[in-house]
Amino acid sequence: MKAAICPQYGPPEVLVIKDIPKPSPKKNEVLVKVVAASLNSGDVRIRGLKVEGFMRFVMRIMLGFSKPRRPVLGTGFSGIVEQVGDEVTQFKVGDEVYGTTGFQQGCHAEYLCIPAHKVITHKPDNASFAEATALPFGGQTAIYFLGKGGIETIQNPQVLIYGATGSVGAAAVQIAKHHGAEVTAVCSSRGQELAQALGADHIIRYDQEDFTKVADRFDIILDAVGKTDKAACKPLLKPEGKFITVEGMDIAAERKEYLELLRQLFEAGTYQAVIDKTYPLDQIVAAHSYVDTGRKKGNVVLEIAS
């Protein structure tokens, strides 16, 4: 099978397309023919080992010191079940599924195996494979970090999302609205239209105004891109307000129940998949280069199979 291989840490040009053996499912696994896969900031961070200080050392321990221990990157996928292990009862051949593989990675390939009890479920009936692939990374991250901020326990929460049009930010706007929040989105001028379409109540264009000068006070401020800090945001918080950032030691949990919620919201028409660009697998270098610019709106999707 074809796969995008990352043989060493470095720029996008280190990536190559190679033929590698097709995996066989264990008794508790499903074999998925990957139709689409996500390419997100986490993938390019791993490829380039783009972390600083102590976290760089931690990442080397987790991922491999001199090169990626698992050279096939990618954590989000959608596809069709081609084979099931003897113990699998939740899925059958032909099921259309989506999910995430976490640090196991392996999604930037034509096939992958994943235990049936892990983060995999049936994709939304009304979603294309590309749309389904675009749901998990930002969606799960937003659910996790807004949950840390206690959004489910706050009545009519006031929420500010910094970086509201990236993969995580776009998801966070929608998840916050699902919880009845009044949402202020901080984004660039070119992202204003998208933020409005996602349901943001107020827009602050960071390239035209300083978001820290607003008069409003917030229950939750979520830095969805890791480009601001608590010191800058503290004056904007209510007395019991919380500043949450995706940057740091805390890694968002990936859970099957998060996927189930995203599926329900998408099928109900209250959550949309935001896709910026799609690339075929053999353009993996160009895809990584684009994500490296930091200017993507929503998600970048790799087309693996037709």
Image (spheres, rainbow, N blue to C red):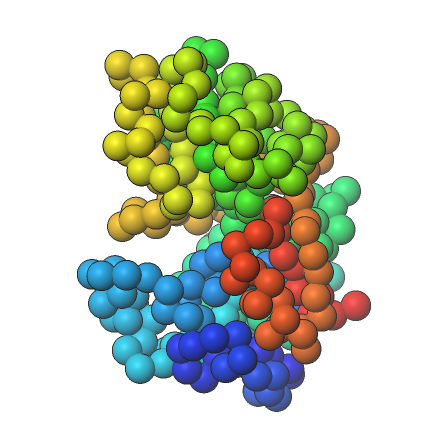
- Residue 195 screen position, x and y as percent: 62, 32
Q: How many marks?
A: 0
Residue 18 visible (yes or no):
yes
Q: Where is residue 57 shown, x and y percent of the image?
A: 23, 67
Quarter location, residue 153: top left
> Relative to 11, does residue 150 appear above or below in the rendering?
above
Report the side of 15 relative to 278 (left or right): left
- The image position of residue 69, as x and y in percent, is 37, 78
**Residue occupying image coordinates x 61% and y 88%:** 19
Q: Residue furthest right?
A: 306
Residue 171 visible at all: no
Please provide percent x and percent y for residue 70: 42, 76
Question: In the rendered view of the protein, which quadrant contains the C terminus?
Answer: bottom right
Furthest residue toward top: 155
Q: What residue appears at the point 60 percent right and 79 percent down from the top-left corner?
A: 3
Image position of 192 (left or right of 228): right
Residue 269 sits in quarter: top right
Looking at the image, which residue is at 28% across and 61% down?
A: 52
Q: What is the residue that sits farthest to the front in this orientation?
A: 208
Q: Is residue 88 above or below residue 162?
A: below
Q: Nearer the viewer, residue 171 or 291?
A: 291
Q: From the viewer's perspective, is residue 270 above or below residue 201?
A: below
* Nearest the eye: 178 or 161: 161
Residue 198 left/right relative to 236: right
Image quarter of the N terminus: bottom right
In the image, 78 versus 293, the foreground residue is 293
Look at the picture and state if 169 lies above or below 282.
Answer: above
Front one among 140 and 15: 15
| Residue drawn at x 32%, y 15% as measured from the top left | 238
* Side (left or right) of 33 relative to 260: right
Give the quarter of the image for residue 45: bottom left
